[in-house]
Image (cartoon, rainbow, N blue to C red):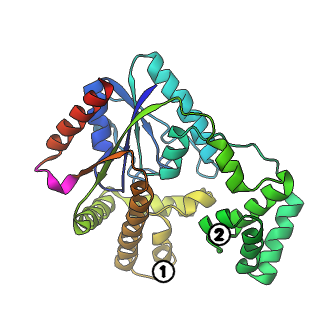
Amino acid sequence: MKVVAIVGPTATGKTKLGVMIAEHFNGEVISADSMQIYEGMNIASAKPTAEEMCGIPHHLMGFVPQGEVFSVAKYVELAKQKIIEIHEKQKLPVIVGGTGLYIDSLLNNVEFVKTETDESLRKSLLESAEKNGAEYLWNQLNEIDPESAEKIEPNNIKRVARAIEIFKITGITISEQNRRSKMIPSPYEAIKIGLKTQDRAVLYDRINRRVDLMLEMGIVDEARELFINGSLGDTAKKAIGYKEFEPYFKHELPLDACVETLKQETRRYAKRQLTWFMRDKNINWFNIDQYTNFDSIAEEVYKLISEKEG
């Protein structure tokens, strides 16, 4: 099944290009953004407006209640269904987003092992970390599965505990499960398009301007309402665009300081996104700052897709 994926760091125009490709090739968009999935989280997640969608159907956006836990496995399951539905309409699925784990897991056909939970074991591991420190728990994981330990920050106690728990229940490490999960070939013929800037300063300027625009659109009110309602789940609370305003709501910092923190955190996030996607040698990259306008980029992308399809 042919699919097109538009990837890259935030504020590079992925949403716009995704719509243009869908218009040009008779497609529909599937979001691959771990925050756009939530209800009510619109401005901070840069969820496209009806006007920006230009009448193109967009899927997997704004359908998960904020307090609900949502996994990459669930995303892959739903995205696979949407790809089939779009293909059955003889349309092109266009996957758009910056959540690398979602995109890679989907396009590489990762099979997720359904593992049971052991609440008493989990509780014991978390209590051990509380008593002896996060490093103590991480060292246990490092002895069991150094490969996974290398990828998980010691301070991410929940993930460290879960990795140990899975090994103790199944006898198989997460890294080994990941290897086994990729043994079934992908059913997708994916054309991957990446958007970035040659000059990092251009990207950071675009991010700063996007945050300024979000302020005009009412991101502070959106964040305040979510915090006051207390409806944010653990994942949503960590979303860039909300947690940065908490000191302002608590009268601990002025608004300007929180806005600067938001800009800084978004720039750091963009850097992490780039690091993730640059590892994929199958991405066709376009430096947006090397073109006079966005239409020129789109024309080059149309040409590339047509060549790959032909």
Helix, strand or loop under label 1: loop
Question: Disc 2 designates what residue?
Answer: 156
Displayed quadrant of residue 214: bottom left
Q: Nearer the viewer, residue 155 or 213?
A: 155
Kindly identify which numbered label has been placed on residue 251.
1
Does residue 54 appear in the picture of this structure?
no
Q: Nearer the viewer, residue 39 or 167?
A: 167
Above-or-below relation of 1 to 163: above
**What separation in Å lies between label 2 and label 1 (alpha carbons)?**
28 Å
| Magenta stretch secondary structure, dominant | helix
Other-residue count near label 1 (Cα within 10 Å), few / some / many at <14 / 14–19 / ≥20: few
Amino acid type, mark 2: Asn
Q: Position of residue 62 (x, y in %)?
A: 50, 42
Above-or-below relation of 287 to 282: below
Q: Position of residue 240 (x, y in %)?
A: 46, 63
Amino acid type, mark 1: His
Q: Nearer the viewer, mark 2 or mark 1?
A: 2
